[in-house]
Amino acid sequence: MSDIKISIIMPVYNVEQYVGKAIESILNQTFTDYELLIVDDGTKDKSGEICDEYAAKDARIQVIHKENGGAPSARNTAIDIARGTYVYFMDSDDWAEKTMLQDMYDMAEQHNAQLVVCGYYIDTYYGDKHITEKICVDDRVFDNAQSFREESYRYFDRNMLYTPWNKLYRLDYMNEHGLRFPNTLWDDFPFNISYMKQVERVVVSTKAYYHFIRARADSETAAYRADMYEKREEEHGWMLDLYREWGVDNAPTKEMIARRYIERMVGCIANVTSSKCTLTKKERRAAIRTMLHNPRVDEALAIARPRSRYMKMMLVPIRWKNTYLTWLESAVITYVKERNTKLFAKLKAGR
């Protein structure tokens, strides 16, 4: 334990069916010079006990038990005591292939990187079966801030820069800039934005190791969110601020931001038509009407270039600002999402 190169941080909350596999995937890594900091965030099931059992068998594992404060609080608790040169964030309901840490460490060391970004897999389960989508772009080594900033739109476009679990971070860089996870919903994105703002040396790899499991109906990415629209608006503001601060205003970046915004608007409308939505029918239509008449929608539609025919068709009622047709279309999307996971995953991947 005297030569810790990577601190692996894993928040745990009510994942007793999954956490064992997540821990095992770390213990099976070919790279061994790590510490695994597991933060039991006031879990109400047996997750904490399971973690303690693993810790009793392996000195590299430390379990911190705390009152529930959310994933940002759990991660920050572990960051404050981390001792590695690098930090890796693992979710407790996913798993990683065995060469992940070694390969990411080698890439970081070879290029003196402040950030390593890898591809990953989305495993969407429907019953006992699943389909897998690999997310990646290309292999690149950026040795200066400007080149990374100008090309970053390509990685945002493939959802490679939002999450923490396909990345290796420098702990000294995090501490130097006072970087911690903000106490907010979907804290990954603002943390990564803060980390990337001044980063200069970045390695991007097509290699994929992490398996993001899309299966839990109660996960944050699947659940109905009453405040989703407000959060997406806030995120869009963060994206605009980032590129404004970077001074990057090229056409590909502007198109990516616009398309990203309008695609997430479709998701916000689908959120309103979810079977778990607590709004009345009248309130749902009022919410959709408010979204359609947001000036940002017209701005995005003027720039965005949808990549698929069906996405272009989906935007027609939004362009028309027709509340009823938009509601009807969204209801169909929600029906497919809730009843045919496989079809929805394929459509989403091909949008």
Image: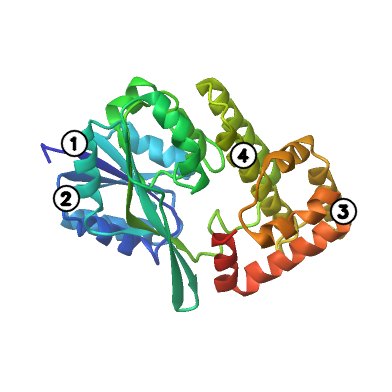
Identify the mark at residue 322; answer none if there is no mark: 3
Q: Is residue 61 above or below residue 80?
A: below
Q: Amino acid at mark 4?
A: Glu
Q: CA distance from mark 4 to mark 1?
A: 34 Å
Binning the other alpha carbons within 10 Å of mark 2 as few (below 14), some (14 to 19) or many (20 upward) gives some
First in sequence: mark 1 or mark 2? 2
Q: Secondary structure at mark 3?
A: loop
Q: Secondary structure at mark 4?
A: helix
What residue did someone put label 4 on? 255
Q: Are marks 2 and 4 in contact (CB under 8 Å)?
A: no
Which marked residue is nearer to the observer: mark 2 or mark 4?
4
Which marked residue is nearer to the observer: mark 3 or mark 2?
3
First in sequence: mark 3 or mark 2? 2
Q: Amino acid at mark 1?
A: Gln
Seen in the image, is 176 located left or right of residue 325?
left
Q: Quadrant of the C terminus?
A: bottom right
Quadrant in which residue 276 is drawn: bottom right
Q: Is residue 303 above or below residue 43?
A: above
Q: Is residue 314 above or below residue 156?
A: below
What residue did someone put label 1 on? 110
Q: Amino acid at mark 2?
A: Phe
First in sequence: mark 2 or mark 4? 2
- Residue drawn at the location 63% of the way across and 36% of the way down: 236
Q: Are marks 1 and 3 in contact (CB under 8 Å)?
A: no
- Residue drawn at the location 85% of the way across and 49% of the way down: 321
First in sequence: mark 1 or mark 3? 1
Give x and y (percent) for residue 161: 45, 41
Q: CA distance from mark 3 to mark 4?
A: 24 Å
